[in-house]
Amino acid sequence: MSSVTPTRSRLSSFILVLGVLLIATNLRGPVTGVGPVLDQIIAYFHLSPSQAGMLTTLPLLAFALASPVAANLAKKQGLEISLFIALLLIGIGLSSRLINSIYVLYIGTAVIGVGIAIGNVLLPSLIKRDFPHKVALMTSAYVLAMGIFAGSYSALIIPLAAYQDIGWAVALSCYGLMTLLSIVVWLPQLKQHSKPTKDILPSTSNSKIWHHALAWQITLCLGLNSFFTYIIIAWLPNILMDGGYSAEQAGVLHGTFQLATATPGLILIPLLAKLKDQRILAISLAMIGSVCFLGLLYLPSLALIWSIFVGFSSGAIFILGLSYISYRTNHSQQAASLSGMAQCVGYSLAAIGPMLTGMLHAYFENWTTTLWLCATTCLLSGVFGYLGGRDIKLDENV
């Protein structure tokens, strides 16, 4: 608590930490909870695979488009009010799922994506400002909170939808109760109107960074990781059900995958501080993930093991890529520019994945191509992670 702004009391510091963790719980579950009930949505609205993939793609497009808007919003309204707006948007999007319309479902999903984009951009900035000496601890805590709640939601949504036949729409909108709690706990922060400093917000204004090979290596490590991760978030339950698992079992394994993505922070963050060179770690993690994707294809009976290690690999490469943004830059403005570049490219690649794999499944009528694509992009992510893991920095003048 000592790292929080000194003017805060112990109680207000505790409420701030609780508020940060509650916001984090809203930054994944509202999107990933769709996966386990996607088959029900497809059947209800008679969707094609590419139309179904759009439900996961829309939030990612919103991430790419809304991320620059988030920085401008924070500069005008302050971090606290901007994060409150993010929660309101997520809550509105979740509530809209109660309306029986495919168009409203798409619009509501996009609104959720905008809210999550604002939260994704601004929550790390708030942590950098208010917890400058505990950034790693707070970051791993909020990533863990995201994974625990998103994973639990995925595991519970099928039995929740089946409970007294309330259906997938009510089950999806139920996450709004968590959003409502988050809004209530965040209300005391609205007394603050603090504007973020330039050095803690992602920025794409530094065009020089786009011409640097190291910047592209780090960006593609993160971007390709996002590409295969969001494919699995969207389609893992369907892949498992086609492999012989029930909807409930697929939902639990989908939740297990998400929990596994959150756990590497507990191991990697202390380890990374001791490693100057992360090349071997990056390629090893990618090879594990790649093998496990093929395990899902050729040994589906061991899906629990494959889901855990795919999730761990995905989360670990993500944390490794994020750490490169700090380790390979010389100052905070350079880090902010590299972060902006990585987010722009990463979300764009991630948005392609679910729709593309939906189309591939419709064409080939199996998941073989999808899982080989994931295995290949996971390995490529590790190759770029290997290149980005060298003990070098961007040029000072970039």
Image: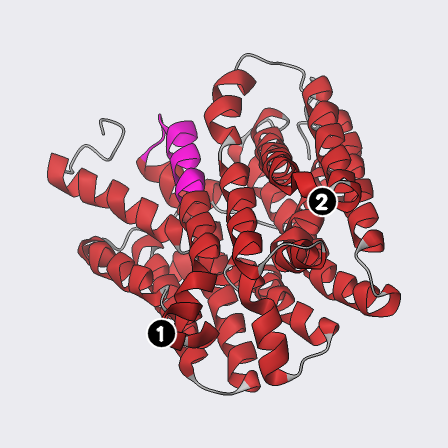
Residue 268 in view: yes
Q: Nearer the viewer, residue 235 or 67?
A: 235
Give residue 17's position: percent from left, percent from top: 26, 41
Looking at the image, which residue sits at the far right? 364
Q: Distance between the residues labelled 1 and 2?
A: 32 Å
The vertical placement of 150 against 274, above or below, is below
Tell me residue 47's x, y (percent). Answer: 67, 80
Residue range (magenta)? 131-145
Up-down relation of residue 379 to residue 81 (above or below): above
Q: In which quarter of the image is the C terminus?
A: top right
Structural crowding at the residue carrying mark 1, measured as other residues with C-alpha within 10 Å and reported as few (<14), some (14–19) or many (≥20):
few
Query: What residue sits right under mark 1 in the picture?
Result: 164
Q: Which image quarter is the N terminus in?
A: top left
Q: Where is residue 299 in the image (x, y as percent from the top left)?
A: 75, 40
Whichever of callouts 1 and 2 sits on the residue coming sooner in the sequence is 1
Q: What residue type is labelled 1?
A: Gln
Residue at the image point whose x is 30% and y is 64% from the top = 177
Q: Nearer the viewer, residue 385 or 251?
A: 251
- Residue 118 visible in rendering: no
Percent position of residue 7, x then y: 15, 36
Task: Say which quarter of the image contains residue 225.
Answer: top right
Q: In this view, does 250 lie above or below 318?
A: below
* Residue 358 on the magenta span: no
Kind of residue at badge 2: Pro
**Residue bearing mark 2:** 300
Q: What element carries label 2?
A: helix
Identified at 68% across, 21% down, the residue is 281
SS at badge 1: helix
In the drawing, does residue 282 fall left or right of residue 101? right
